[in-house]
Amino acid sequence: MSGIESISGISSADLLKQKSKIGSVDSDDAFAKHLKSALNEVNELQQKSENALGDMATGQVKDLHQAALAIGKAETSMKLMLEIRNKALNAYKELGRTQI
């Protein structure tokens, strides 16, 4: 067999096993740790950007290209984090509108 025929189907039992793993406390903790790690990384990039801006303002910048890269990374990471926040808020609001 080659191609699509070689792909096995997923049984309901497999899906239920995966669902039980997803709903466990460990996965919630892992998500929270991952989110906190991402927020810390964005914070570090923002601090590096502020330092680069300060160095540019005082004329102490050694490499203008590296300073511009630090500022660009901080801006991009902040935009990404804001989009993630917006998506999470929209999902939360959608769950609130869901009727049971």
Image (spheres, rainbow, N blue to C red):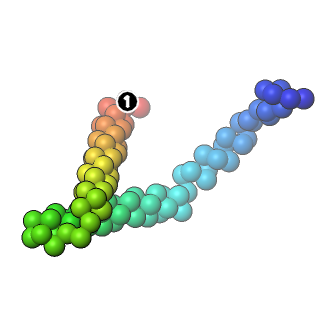
Q: Please identify the residue farthest to the right as the structure is shown.
A: 1
The residue nearer to you, when weighing 6 against 19, is 6
Q: Please identify the residue farthest to the bottom as the structure is shown.
A: 60
The residue nearer to you, when weighing 82 against 61, is 61
Answer with left or right where residue 65 lies relative to residue 21: left
When the figure is inspected, residue 24 is found, relative to residue 56, above or below; the finding is: above
| The image quarter in which residue 56 lies | bottom left
Q: Residue at x 34, y 40 (%)?
A: 87
Is there any visible trace of residue 47 in the rendered image?
no
Q: Secondary structure at mark 1?
A: loop
**Residue 69 at x, y = what percent?**
30, 57
Quarter of the picture containing the C terminus is top left
Answer with left or right where residue 49 lies relative to residue 5: left
Q: Residue at x 43, y 64 (%)?
A: 33
**Residue 32 at x, y = what percent?**
42, 60
When the figure is inspected, residue 19 is found, relative to residue 26, above or below; the finding is: above
| The image quarter in which residue 66 lies | bottom left
Answer with left or right where residue 87 lies relative to residue 15: left
Answer with left or right where residue 89 lies relative to residue 61: right
